[in-house]
Image (tube, helix red, strand yellow):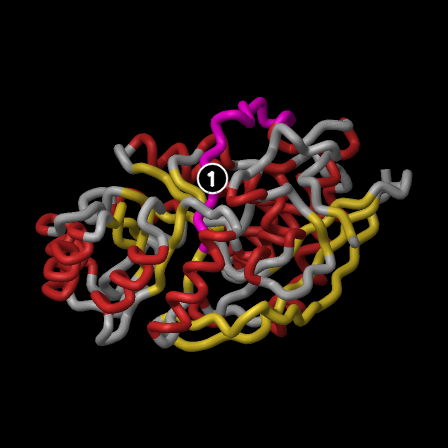
Amino acid sequence: MTLETSFERRSLPLENPFTIARGTQTHAENVIVRVVDDAGMTGFGGAAPSPHYGETAATVEAVLPELLAVVEAVDDPHAFEAIERRLRSRISGNPAARCAVSIAIHDLAAKRLGVPLYRLWGLDPSQTPNTSFTIGLDETDVVRQKTAAAVESGYEILKLKLGTDREEELIEAVREEAPEARIRVDANEAWTPRETIDNSRMLEEYGVEFIEQPVPAENPDGLRFAYQRSALPIAADESCVTLEDIPQIADRADIVNLKLMKCGGLYEAQRMIHAARAHGLEVMLGCMIESNASIAAACHLGPLLDYADLDGSLLLKEDDYEGVSLPEGRIDLAGLDRSGTGAIGR
């Protein structure tokens, strides 16, 4: 077998400007990887780098030639563990770049066997949770409008970005527009431990499910303090990046929010899921704002999760790829009629 590899950068416009406590985004810079076997079958993977973790589209492009050389040298898309181990040894950082390669080889391997990726892993598609749909920070009237639109579109689980001086005003607006929805909030490290405790009591009154990353990752003692006193469960995102972080946050959170772009690949994500379970943690899989070239792959991990936040492609105005169908937030793995991850060019 001879594998050929390539990649290209894509700037994808968002449907609406997307704001969190750290800033506003209007485009998502993704890099798409292709791995082609000698029969012409192609595996797709996407990188959605985050400057918060030290990556940009430019750094992804800079390291991909070296990473793809590993794939060509191994020359077997089924050798997941060997390839991801070699990728980590070659480039220890740049997890989004490594992730794009990981997704592409998994996609190709499943396509060569003629099965969806979840079947390759032996997972039950009926056990996949629905994804939440995110409402970004904005003026209260705009948040209200976006919530009403999400409810009209059938989304039953909403995630509200917080991190302002209008927290109760915003959650009240969302709850009024979505009285039956399950609501989660994400402060993106914007609160102090004491603010977390106070806000948790307020948010509990609005029926919020849990709070994601309220305290900066650089303050692990503060996160533990808030976790021990919060009226709501705490999910760790920025505090949980790699496998080694799992034991460190086991006494600071109830839930881990894993992301493929943080951990570096599908094989590594499964290791983190099992480690989280071993430490008594619930598991959510989140995302950046991503093309279906990567979101589709994340969907196949659904049966291993308690919660899903895989709406990255739903926030795009345009996407070059179709993926797993997400009607009203339902991750429809069972209805997938394509092999591999399900990512296909439009």
Residue 38 x/y as whole percent: 89, 41
- Horizontally, residue 216 falls left or right of residue 224, namely right
Is residue 133 depicted above or below 180 in this figure? below
- Horizontally, residue 31 falls left or right of residue 228, namely right
Residue at image point 55% right, 38% down: 331
State the extent of the magenta-drawn residues as a range: 119-133
Question: Quadrant of residue 198 in the image?
Answer: bottom left
Residue 179 x/y as whole percent: 31, 49
Residue at image point 71% right, 36% down: 340
Residue at image point 16% right, 68% down: 192
Residue lying farthest to the right in this orientation: 39
Question: Quadrant of residue 212 in the image?
Answer: bottom left
Is residue 81 depicted above or below 188 in this figure? above
Work out which quarter of the rendered image holds the C terminus and state it: bottom right
Q: Is residue 217 visible?
A: no
Residue 195 x/y as whole percent: 14, 66
Indicate whether residue 129 is drawn in magenta.
yes
Q: Nearer the viewer, residue 83 or 111?
A: 111
Residue 180 x/y as whole percent: 33, 45
- Horizontally, residue 210 falls left or right of residue 293, namely left
Q: Is residue 123 visible?
A: yes
Type of the residue with mark 1: Asn
Residue at image point 58% right, 22% down: 122
Q: Residues within 10 Å of mark 1 (few under 14, many from 20)?
A: many
Question: Quadrant of residue 66 in the image?
Answer: bottom right
Work out which quarter of the rendered image holds the N terminus and state it: top right
Is the stretch drawn in magenta largely helix, strand or loop?
A: loop
Q: Tell me the residue that label 1 is attached to.
A: 130
Is residue 283 depicted above or below 160 in this figure? above
Q: Secondary structure at mark 1?
A: loop
Indicate whether residue 124 is drawn in magenta.
yes
